[in-house]
Amino acid sequence: MTHTEPSQRGRLITLEGGEGAGKSTLLAGLRAHFEGKGLDVLYTREPGGTPVGEAIRALVLDPAHRHIAAETELLLMFAARAQLVREVLRPALAAGRWVLCDRFTDASYAYQGGGRGIDAARIAELERIATEGLKPDLTLLLDLPVAAGRARASQRSDADRIEAERDDFFERVRAAYRARAAAEPQRFCVIDASRPAEAVLRAALAAIEGLRA
Ligand code: Z5A
């Protein structure tokens, strides 16, 4: 992973999972590991990762906006994504860098598709516009029963607007993620997130190692 040579293609690795699955914990572990090895990796997140994207994040997750329509929510997620792809992801990958992104397009299929019930074909139309075909090289899906994730998340501060949804919403999100992983097993690595954080980190590192081969 000496990705400073521009001749080398960068890699896009995304982290996905339901509420409280442990993405932030895993990201911190991966970051410590890569920094310890002196590896140059770009860390970013969705929605967010650019000034425009972070402004959209604040808007779309604000619990004060209780009545955002599902389609509005979807468009905001893709607006932030379009900006991230052009301002951050494409330039970094073109420069041969590896990028670790906390959520990406799969989250829209899981939350707005599975959770809100928006048709996958409509989401695919927006994906074409926003990403222009950019797909992750590897997606680490942290899979955890909804009740366990919610119990973990409840130890934190106040819920954002989407976290305030009911259990059945998160069951649909989980099912949609698992269906996407089953449909693209070569891209997804599904990690049992009920295991201790160190075991989750080891599984993620093994999958990332496979990308270098
Ligand atoms: N969203 C969307 O709807 N559509 C989209 O297209 C996109 C996003 C891109 C913000 O995402 C929201 O945006 C999200 C989906 C929506 N809404 N929801 N729900 P986010 O990624 O920023 O927020 P999040 O999903 O709520 O993730 P999080 O809050 O950062 O949780 P996490 O990263 O998965 O968990 P954590 O903070 O690492 O861990 C939670 C607790 O569990 C904490 O106390 C840890 O110490 C503990 N933990 C972590 N791992 C373990 C293990 N392995 N064992 C035991 N305990 C653990």
Image (tube, grey):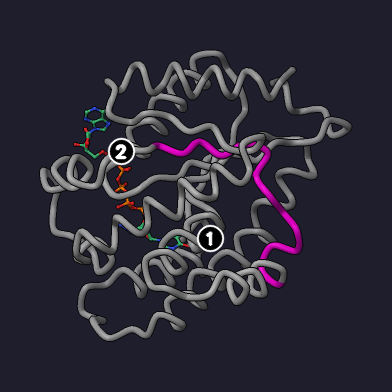
The image quarter containing residue 133 is: bottom right
Name the foreground residue: 138 vs 36. 138
Residue 116 lies, with reference to residue 158, above or below; the image says below
Q: Please identify the residue farthest to the right as the structure is shown.
A: 7
- Classify residue 2 as left or right of residue 179: right
Q: Position of residue 135 (x, y in %)?
A: 69, 50
Q: CA distance from mark 2 to mark 1?
A: 29 Å
* Precedes in sequence: disc 2 or disc 1: 1
Q: Amino acid at mark 2?
A: Leu
Residue 54 lies, with reference to residue 41, above or below; the image says below
Q: Amino acid at mark 1?
A: Thr
Q: Position of residue 55 (x, y in %)?
A: 42, 70
- At 49% across and 15% down in the image, what residue appears? 36
- Classify residue 92 as left or right of residue 141: right
Q: Residues within 10 Å of mark 2 (few under 14, many from 20)?
A: many
Task: Give the residue at mark 1.
Answer: 50
* Quarter containing the N terminus: top right
- At 48% across and 33% down in the image, what residue appears? 190
SS at mark 1?
loop
Q: Which residues are magenta?
A: 129-142
- Classify residue 168 as left or right of residue 190: left
How many labels, in total? 2
- At 46% across and 82% down in the image, what residue appears? 71
Magenta stretch containing residue 137, yes or no? yes
Quick check: is the Cβ at mark 1 less than 8 Å away from ligand 1?
no
Name the foreground residue: 160 vs 179. 179
Task: Give the residue at mark 2.
Answer: 144
Q: Residues within 10 Å of mark 1 (few under 14, many from 20)?
A: some
Viewer-nearest of discs 2 and 1: 2
Task: Say if mark 2 contacts mark 1, CB within 8 Å.
Answer: no
Q: Position of residue 170 (x, y in %)?
A: 29, 57
The image quarter containing residue 171 is: bottom left
